[in-house]
Image (tube, rainbow, N blue to C red):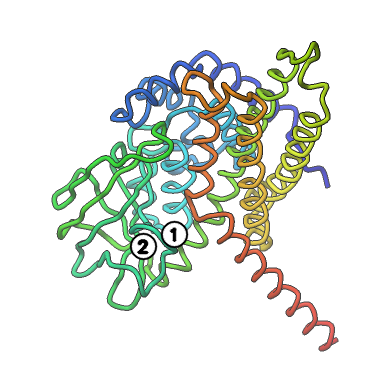
Amino acid sequence: MDFDYTDEQKALKDEARRFLADASPISVVRGVLDDPARGHDEALWGRIAEQGWCGAAIPEAYGGHEFGYVELCGLAEELGRSLAPVPFASSIYQFAEAILAEGSEEQKQELLPDVASGETIGTIAVSEGPGTVSAKRMAVEYANGTLTGAKLPVTDGMAAGKAVVLAKGSDGPVLVVTDLSGPGVTREAVSTLDPTRGAAKILFDNAPAQVLGAGGDGIAALAHVHNRSAVLMSFEQLGGSDHALEMARDYALERYAFGRQIGSYQAIKHKLADVFIRIEVARASSYYGAWALSTNAPELPVAAAAARVAGCNAYWQAAKENIQTHGGIGFTWEADPHLHYRRARHLGLAIGSAKTWKRKLTDLLEEQRATEQAERQAA
């Protein structure tokens, strides 16, 4: 089995890299970092929408281009590499995937065309503060077609026009969709470690909402959406990891200490070699996840968890060692390594921490092993 991009997909990635090099240089990223109230770069978002990227995996029947999930993974990798300050992950990996996976036909027809064109930005509102989300701890309530309570933090919550919200219904947790520009919704910006991905506190006061799809177990539905998001996000982490390693390598080759390139010292060589290994593990796991997502394979939950854990570990390691390799200037505002550090921390928590996904992967593998043992015994 060949886990690699085709020539056409590689050409798409190359074109995306050239486009982002022109449209999203580091000055654009810093422009949002220096003015956190912006939340994202609107001009860049408009140019990305014009390229058709928002509809890459959305079917043509819902206004998309239906290129495919592998193509979307390639775009995600390049967006991660460039640190593009846009709400692509929230709107496409999460909101659009939630509508596609759990929405009714009517909801897909109503919501997805504007998401595919980039006219509407979407997000998912799950967190209600520190800690793991659970049915017992959930305070946001859905009753009689309205939402009441607060979600915090919601990534890209200030920019989004629509949101899928996890709420407590009469029969347990449920996913609902709401208009964030409608009545009963109040938003305020909150500061996070990565200001290039804006966040908000969203207050619902009898805000109109509707159940996503046929309803049912909201926790299970969210887990299904997160499996899809995790694969796409792992490619964004992969792109960021690659660029962070390249930054460290380039600096190690140009910086001299005691008459030698610092890259010639074993302390630096071994450090960057360890990062490279982490990245290659993440690459293999992400490619496996892309296959599972694009084919809707039953292995998707395991593949997604593996990609998520490997992606988080690789990007965190690459970002951290990039700062260390740059030495005394590595952590300064003027140097660029901290931009990857911020993004790595953000992506590492966006849909649950690596620790949470490790537990999930362990549980899935144990369940798989028990099933295989039972089948052997039955045979």
Most foreground residue, 61 or 228: 228
Secondary element type, mark 2: strand
Residue 53 spot, x, y in % from top left: 50, 31
Secondary element type, mark 1: helix
Q: Please indicate whether residue 109 sits to the left or right of residue 369 in the image.
A: left
Q: Is residue 256 above or below residue 7?
A: above
Type of amino acid at the residue the image marks with label 2: Leu
Quarter that holds the C terminus? bottom right
Residue 350 spot, x, y in % from top left: 47, 48
Residue 13 spot, x, y in % from top left: 64, 26
Q: Is residue 264 above or below residue 359?
A: above
Report the label total.
2
Q: Nearer the viewer, mark 2 or mark 1?
A: 2
Q: Name the residue tied to disc 1.
A: 102
* Disc ID at residue 175: 2
Most foreground residue, 144 or 24: 24
Residue 378 spot, x, y in % from top left: 81, 88
Q: CA distance from mark 2 to mark 1?
A: 9 Å
Residue 168: name its quadrant.
bottom left
Q: Is residue 225 above or below residue 93?
A: below
